[in-house]
């Protein structure tokens, strides 16, 4: 993943990778939290073709832990921009290193307003006991076997339990 931490100046890129030979700025396994990055210091986090390699399909705690780390390092109003193979594309489950599918339905669970709107009215599971962050979905797009998205970190979170 790439992180941008420079307000009002040209972008400074901080790269994170588990493989040292890729020469990232930070060598780290993103499945291990907390990440060695400061709170509220990045305007943007970019993750292209990475989220499907983290966590485990059906394991809510790992899903929310990954996004809690992204939320933690973003400044208020910061953006998460990324892409993943689409659920119906050749590589979604075709790549043996993929651990999960991320799509627009998955990302709904990051938006605290969706819990307020849907819990008790739809089949949406209530994860507010473990997810206290808050992202607003800005853009979702599918094309050429890919899912592209842009999320905005809402800080403080709009969480409402009950």
Image (cartoon, helix red, strand yellow):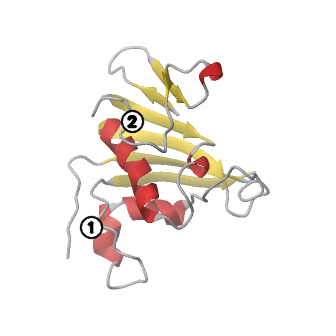
Would you identify the image quadrant in which residue 9 lies?
A: top left
Would you identify the image quadrant in which residue 121 lies?
A: bottom left
Q: Position of residue 152 (x, y in %)?
A: 37, 46
Q: Which residue sits at x=71%, y=57%?
A: 92
Q: Position of residue 124 (x, y in %)?
A: 41, 77
Query: Which residue is denoted by mark 2 in the rendering?
Result: 35
Q: Which residue sits at x=60%, y=22%?
A: 20
Mark 2 vs mark 1, CA separation in Å: 22 Å
Examine the rendered structure and indicate whether residue 48 appears above or below residue 67.
above
Q: Which residue sits at x=30%, y=63%?
A: 130
Query: Which residue is denoted by mark 1 in the rendering?
Result: 129
Examine the rendered structure and indicate whether residue 152 appears above or below residue 26.
below
Examine the rendered structure and indicate whether residue 140 appears above or below residue 105.
above
Question: For the residue labelled by badge 2, is the local secondary structure a helix, a strand or a loop?
Answer: loop
Instruction: Depth check: give the residue in front, 68 or 151.
Output: 68
Instruction: Depth check: give the residue in front, 42 or 24.
Output: 24
Quick check: 148 left or right of 93? left
Would you identify the image quadrant in which residue 36 lies?
A: top left
Q: Position of residue 30 (x, y in %)?
A: 49, 40
- In the picture, the disc for residue 110 is none
Q: Is disc 2 surrounded by few (<14), some (14 to 19) or many (20+) residues within 10 Å? A: some
Q: Position of residue 139 (x, y in %)?
A: 50, 51
Which comes sooner in the sequence, label 2 or label 1? Answer: 2
Examine the rendered structure and indicate whether residue 34 appears above or below residue 97.
above
Q: Quadrant of the C terminus?
A: bottom left
């Amino acid at each position: 993943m790439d992180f941008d931490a420079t307000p009002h100046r040209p972008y400074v890129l901080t790269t994170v990778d588990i493989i040292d030979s890729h020469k990232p700025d930070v060598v780290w396994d993103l499945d291990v939290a907390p990440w060695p990055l400061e709170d509220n210091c990045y305007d943007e986090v970019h993750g292209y073709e990475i989220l499907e390699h983290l966590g485990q399909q059906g394991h809510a705690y790992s899903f929310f832990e990954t996004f809690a780390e992204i939320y933690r390092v973003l400044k208020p109003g910061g953006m998460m921009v990324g892409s993943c193979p689409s659920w119906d594309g050749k590589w979604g489950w075709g790549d043996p290193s993929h651990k999960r599918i991320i799509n627009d339905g998955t990302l709904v669970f990051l938006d605290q307003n969706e819990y307020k709107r849907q819990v008790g009215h739809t089949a949406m599971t209530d994860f507010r006991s473990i997810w206290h962050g808050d992202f607003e979905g800005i853009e979702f797009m599918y094309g050429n076997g890919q899912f592209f998205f842009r999320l905005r970190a809402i800080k403080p979170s709009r969480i409402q339990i009950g």
